[in-house]
Each structure stands twice: as C-alpha cells, then as structure tokens.
C-alpha cells in the first residue's frame, strides 16, 4: 500500500474536520431543541402546580369561611331551601323572641327585588323590655339563615318606663351554592333535613357589658339606676328598721347585718351602721334630742405629731 502524499493527508484532515463540524452542529442543534422542549414542559408543569396550589388555598379559605359561618352563625347550607326558607325564618324569629322575653307581633312579607339575591322582606314589630329587645337582636344573628337588617326603629313614646317598641325590616337573602365540577350537583333532599338551629341550640351567652349598659343608660326614657345610702326608718327597743340601698326593708338587731348593712349601735334617735367598710350614723328627725354615737377621735396628748 502506497503512502499518502502530503496533499492527500491535508485533504483527509480537512474532510474529517468538516464532517466533525457538521455532526457537532447537527446534533448540537437537536440537543438545543430537546433542551428547549424539556424547559417548556417544566415551565408548564410549574404553572400547573401553581394553579393547583392557588386552588387549594382558595378552597381552604372557603372552608374556613364556612366553618366560621357554622360556628358563629350556625349556618347550614343543606337547610337553605328557597321554597321554605322564608317561613322557617319567621318561625325561628318567633321562637327567639319568646326565649328572650320579647313580644313579637304580626309580620308582613313582601317579595324581594327580582334582579338581586333577595327572597323576601319581612316587616316585624314587637314590644317589650329594652334588655329583652337587645337580647333578641343579639340572638337573631345565630338563627342560621342569611339575613340582613335593612331598617330598625326604636320608639318609647307613650310606653311605660323600661318598655320599647321595636320595628325591623329584615331581608331574607337567596343562597345558591355552586354545583360541583365533577358528578351530579348536590341536592338538599339527598340528606335528611337538619333540625332548626333554635330548637337544639344551647342557651344564648350573656350579653356583653357594652350591651348591658344600654338598659341603665337612660336613652330609652328609663332613669339610670343609682344606689342610695342606707336609711333609718324607725327604732323599736334594741332593734332598728333599716332600708338597704337595694330598696329592701327589715328589722335588724344590734350586731346583725341586713343586705350588706351591719347595725353596730342604737341610740335615742340614731343608729350607727357599717356599710362597705365605712361607718355611718343614720338619724331620725335630723338627730334632735340625741347625741352622736360616733366615737371621738383620739388625741396625741404630750406627743409631738409625726413629721
């Protein structure tokens, strides 16, 4: 076999170099296309994961809102039937008013606006003590149905002290749950009807202090209740007839206590009592004809006063 000349060797080298360069460009381009395809699929998978994560967060927020509605307002979606919800609301409001001691009278029903989410508008009127009306309004928010108080009027004119006439305009809203994305929509008749919220509901918690203060604020014509001092009404031997600050009266012997008032001593026309840690002298006829029962203050004889 003959040896290749220098020119032939140079030609072979150039051909091999050109072939390697072509293969490198060809497969490099193919590899770049494959890498771009993988990167595109990764970005799509990342976007899909982000969408799923957003859906999970959205559904979790919905679940938290529903749990709050159930725990705070006793709202049950399965009980929201448009054909019976208005009648159920009227029955439950009557039951709540009876439990609160508030006399709820007749109610008028008018249809809601057809272009909105209103089922009906109820006009309610009741009469009773102010605190009972406040207790009724506080308990109505846990009735378990979507309600909105559109109008409220308080009237005390021509009524006895402590009584109030309450007029309410209550809007019953329409609840329309969205159908599930998979499977048939949930029907309220698929599960047994849940008992009304007010029947099996625990007793209402005590009203907050800010609502309790309304009853004694005097804004509804009732003067605020103030506590007066103990009063001496009469003396019978070693007994005294006392009127306690809460209005109760009783015959008390020396050394005994009555409604927080302790009788210490009895004089001719006065009595020495102790109330809330303070000693007081109660008088009859302005104390005429008698001497005080309060012991005189001790004097520091022959001693310098404390600096």
Image (tube, rainbow, N blue to C red):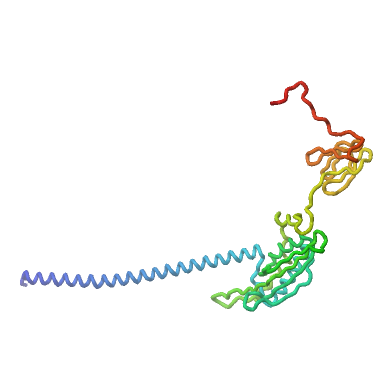
State which quadrant residue 41 falls in: bottom left
Judge left or right: residue 297 versus residue 89: right
- 288 vs 142: above or below: above
Viewer-side residue, 254 vs 163: 163
Residue 107, image x, y percentages: 76, 72
Residue 185, image x, y percentages: 59, 77
Judge left or right: residue 101 versus residue 235: left
Residue 15, image x, y percentages: 14, 72
Quadrant assignment for the N terminus: bottom left
Q: Residue at the spot x=30%, y=70% of the render? A: 32
- 244 vs 192: above or below: above
Labels in figure, total:
0
Q: Residue at the spot x=24%, y=73% of the render? A: 26
Viewer-side residue, 76 vs 260: 260
Residue 104, image x, y percentages: 78, 68
- 240 vs 18: above or below: above
Q: Residue at the spot x=71%, y=70% of the render? A: 169
State which quadrant residue 110 falls in: bottom right
Quadrant assignment for the C terminus: top right
State which quadrant residue 151 falls in: bottom right
Residue farthest to the right, as pictured: 237
Q: Residue at the spot x=82%, y=64% of the render? A: 158
């Amino acid at each position: 076999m003959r040896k290749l000349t220098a020119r032939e060797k140079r030609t072979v080298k150039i051909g091999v170099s050109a072939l390697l360069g072509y293969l490198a460009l060809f497969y490099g381009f193919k590899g770049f296309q494959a890498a771009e395809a993988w990167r595109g699929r990764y970005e799509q998978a990342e976007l899909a994961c982000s969408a799923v994560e957003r859906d999970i967060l959205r559904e979790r927020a919905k679940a938290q809102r529903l749990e709050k509605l159930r725990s705070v307002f006793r709202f049950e979606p399965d009980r929201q039937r448009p054909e019976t919800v208005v009648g159920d609301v009227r029955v439950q409001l009557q039951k709540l008013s009876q439990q609160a001691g508030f006399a709820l009278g007749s109610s008028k029903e008018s249809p809601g606006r057809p272009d909105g989410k209103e089922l009906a508008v109820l006009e309610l009127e009741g009469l009773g003590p102010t605190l009972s009306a406040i207790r009724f309004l506080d308990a109505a928010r846990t009735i378990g149905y979507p309600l909105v108080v559109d109008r409220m009027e308080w009237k005390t004119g021509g009524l006895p002290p402590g009584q109030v006439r309450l007029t309410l305009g209550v809007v019953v809203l329409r609840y329309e749950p969205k159908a599930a994305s998979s499977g048939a929509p949930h029907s309220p008749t698929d599960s047994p009807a849940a008992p009304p919220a007010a029947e099996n509901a625990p007793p209402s918690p005590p009203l907050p202090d800010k609502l309790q203060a309304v009853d004694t604020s005097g804004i509804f014509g009732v003067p605020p209740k103030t506590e007066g001092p103990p009063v001496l009404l009469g003396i019978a031997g070693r007994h005294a007839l006392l009127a306690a600050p809460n209005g109760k009266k009783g015959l008390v012997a020396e050394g005994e206590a009555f409604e927080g008032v302790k009788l210490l001593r009895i004089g001719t026309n006065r009595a020495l009592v102790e109330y809330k840690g303070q000693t007081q002298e109660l008088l009859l006829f302005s104390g005429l004809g008698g001497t005080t029962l309060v012991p005189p203050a001790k004097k520091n004889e022959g001693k310098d006063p404390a600096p």
